[in-house]
Amino acid sequence: MGLKRKIFSALKDNIIPGLFLWCIGIAVVASYYLNESTRSLFHGIIQLKEEYGFLYSAISTSLFGGLIPFIFMRLSGRDQVGNSLFHGVVFVAYWALRGVDVDSFYRLQGWIFGNGVDWQTIFFKVCVDQFIYCVFWATPVTAGFYSLKEADFSFGKWKKEKKGSYLVQMIIVFTVSTWLVWIPGTAIIYSLPAPLQIPLFNLTLCFFVILVSVFSKKEKAV
């Protein structure tokens, strides 16, 4: 399958999940700003995030980005490659580290642009997030991780099976297709106060990682 067809196929696959994720995000934001009855729940989450900081981000992201999607993929029969326990541990560890990574980036964004929720601040944060952070770091790391996963986390097998052009194409496809989901998604995330951004990111990530895993499985079959 050519690069253009892969990109088009990925975009097509992402449209409905993207709409679903945006609806969840908008519902969370609306609930925070408009529903007084949920305010205590949000304040509880804020207190947890502020008290535990990076530890909260590591644990919550490992759960929503790693453990839950991993269990879903296994139980649904979409991922039966390799040792189940080993893959689960790697998934949890990887997304724990990424949780700290994302939290650090969000803090940096707050330091540079402030933590306001006005449209100008959100606009600049989304641009830096999607066109700098994701293009040069987050997407290549994700593509590399999932290509290594396809090789059963064996570097020898990965070097033998995965050519450089394959990884480059995977990065390009991931970058373009994830923009469809994450440009609106990050705008929604940055609409919340800073302590709630990681929790909403995790909720969105949970569904998105499942989507990436399914796409990665399709790519292997092509």
Image: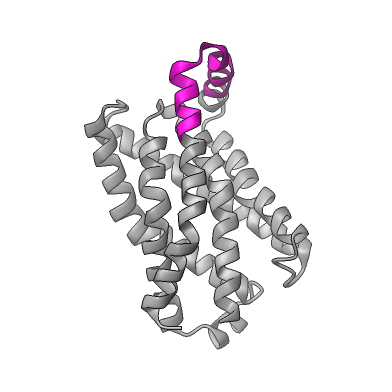
Which secondary structure type mostly characterizes the magenta part of the structure?
helix
Magenta-drawn segment: 26-47
116 is higher (above) or lower (below) than 201: above
Q: Quadrant of residue 108?
A: top left
- From the viewer's side, name the closer residue of 132 and 217: 217
Q: Name the residue: 32% across, 33% down.
A: 110
* Residue 130 screen position, x and y as percent: 33, 51
174 is higher (above) or lower (below) than 104: below
Q: Name the residue: 72% across, 72% down.
A: 81
Looking at the image, the residue that sits furthest to the left is 120
- From the viewer's side, name the closer residue of 92 and 222: 222
Q: Quadrant of residue 12?
A: bottom left
Query: Is residue 81 rendered to the left or right of residue 158?
Result: right
Q: Is residue 102 visible?
A: yes
* Residue 139 screen position, x and y as percent: 42, 61
Looking at the image, the residue that sits furthest to the top is 36
The verdict on residue 67 being magenta is no
- From the viewer's side, name the closer residue of 91 and 68: 68
Query: Is residue 17 rendered to the left or right of residue 114?
Result: right
Location of the C terminus by quadrant is: bottom right
* Residue 158 screen position, x and y as percent: 57, 80
77 is higher (above) or lower (below) than 180: below
170 is higher (above) or lower (below) than 58: below
Q: Is residue 96 visible?
A: no
Q: Name the residue: 56% across, 24% down.
A: 45
* Residue 151 screen position, x and y as percent: 62, 77
